[in-house]
């Protein structure tokens, strides 16, 4: 199942995320995902596993054209010449389906301009922003030439940023939820509401949560190193939550984020230098 982006590009509603994975872990997880039927992968320069993701794609034997691949320019690379091309080289591909600017830090408009140029050149097929909200989001929307197609932001049943979602929906920009399973938090996965729904549908609580995401229109990229979980997370298309159940899940919201960075911390990312060539 796909969502269609505002420029007509089809994006699978479920992908695998590779945050905190070493190159070896990312290679194994992505290979497992692709051979289990996934057709969407999310990585980032900052994860230092783009080269491993590229290896997994080639090993899988799945045609590049069948895969939707997303990656992100890290904040200290916004003024680095050739950074989009560096990701292409590491991933071993000649185009990226979706490329984000990873953080609203430093000279983010320079990073966004690189994405717009790469989009016009056909090196990337859609443009994303990540972790933008408030004033920085407004500045980006005012100054950009091409409106972003996707925003990646924290979203799970304990936390939904409705204001940012609605603001961007006006431009047809879709939400890709990070930490869709609350980064694996047991309290979330064991919420009584999810246990009850999991029993009703013969599914796991993780599957109920992922199903809820896609029914509210969120694309999801659950991260997992466990082959059983990887398979389970894609198996969410044979049941549907009712309107009443969706309303019940909405009441679980606690406005509680798992990742709380101060503005200073976010700004400091612009000075956090990464050596992309050093990855295995
Ligand atoms: N743009 C950003 O700034 C940003 C920030 C954070 C993350 N992200 C992206 O979002 C992706 C998802 O975030 P995440 O991986 O940190 O968090 P997550 O997907 O919410 O949760 C991952 C955790 O849940 C566990 N898990 C996965 N499937 C499960 C299942 N079916 N049952 C029980 N536990 C399960 C995993 O453990 P096992 O390995 O044992 O399955 C892992 O500990 C990242 O990989 C990355 O691509 C982006």
Image: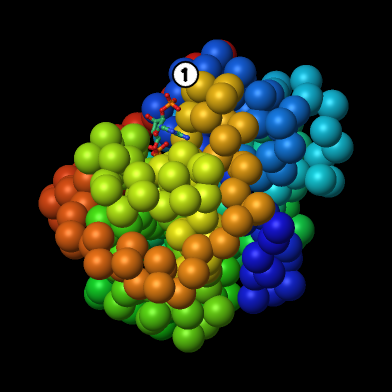
Q: Is residue 226 visible?
A: yes
- Compared with 78, 126 (above or below) is below
State left or right for residue 86 relative to residue 215. Answer: right
Rendered location of residue 150, percent (x, y): 53, 64
State left or right for residue 23 relative to residue 247. Answer: right
Q: Which residue position is annotated with label 1?
A: 22
Q: Quadrant of ligand 1?
A: top left
Depth order, front residue of 177/140: 177
10 Å neighbourhood of mark 1: few (<14), some, or many (≥20)? some
Tell me the residue at 34%/35% (across/down). Answer: 184
Tell me the residue at 81%/45% (across/down). Answer: 66
Rendered location of residue 247, percent (x, y): 35, 72
- Compared with 98, 92 (above or below) is above
Instruction: State the image quarter where residue 168 is shown.
Output: bottom left
Instruction: State the image quarter where residue 146 is shown.
Output: bottom right
**How many numbered dots are placed on residues in this image?**
1
State left or right for residue 97 relative to residue 192. Answer: right
Q: Residue furthest toward the bottom?
A: 170
Tell me the residue at 47%/51% (across/down). Answer: 200
Instruction: State the image quarter where residue 57 is shown.
Output: top right
Tell me the residue at 46%/60% (across/down). Answer: 212
Q: Quadrant of the C terminus?
A: top right
Q: Is residue 115 visible?
A: no
Rendered location of residue 97, percent (x, y): 68, 52
- Compared with 78, 127 (above or below) is below
Judged from the image, the secondary structure of the residue bearing numbered disc 1 is loop
């Amino acid at each position: 199942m796909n969502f269609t982006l505002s420029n007509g590009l089809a994006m699978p509603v479920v992908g695998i995320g590779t945050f905190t994975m070493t190159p070896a872990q990312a290679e194994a997880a992505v290979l497992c995902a692709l051979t289990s039927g996934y057709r969407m992968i999310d990585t980032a320069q900052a994860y230092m596993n783009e080269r491993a993701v590229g290896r997994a794609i080639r090993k899988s034997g799945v045609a590049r054209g069948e895969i939707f691949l997303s990656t992100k320019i890290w904040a200290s690379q916004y003024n680095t010449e050739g950074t989009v091309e560096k990701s292409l080289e590491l991933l071993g591909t000649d185009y990226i389906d979706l490329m984000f600017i990873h953080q609203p830090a430093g000279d983010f408009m320079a990073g966004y301009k690189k994405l717009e140029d790469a989009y016009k050149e056909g090196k990337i097929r859609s443009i994303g922003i990540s972790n933008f909200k408030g004033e920085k989001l407004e500045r980006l929307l005012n100054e950009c030439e091409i409106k972003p197609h996707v925003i990646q932001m924290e979203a799970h049943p304990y936390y939904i940023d409705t204001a940012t979602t609605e603001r961007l929906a006006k431009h047809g920009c879709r939400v890709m939820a990070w930490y869709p399973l609350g980064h694996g938090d047991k309290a979330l996965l064991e919420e009584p509401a999810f246990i009850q729904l999991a029993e009703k549908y013969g599914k796991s609580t993780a599957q109920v949560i992922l199903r809820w995401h896609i029914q509210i229109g969120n694309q999801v990229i659950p991260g997992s190193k466990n082959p059983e979980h990887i398979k389970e997370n894609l198996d969410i298309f044979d049941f549907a939550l009712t309107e009443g159940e969706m309303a019940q899940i909405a009441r679980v919201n606690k406005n509680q984020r798992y990742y709380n960075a101060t503005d200073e911390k976010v700004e400091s990312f612009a000075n956090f230098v990464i050596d992309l060539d050093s990855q295995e």
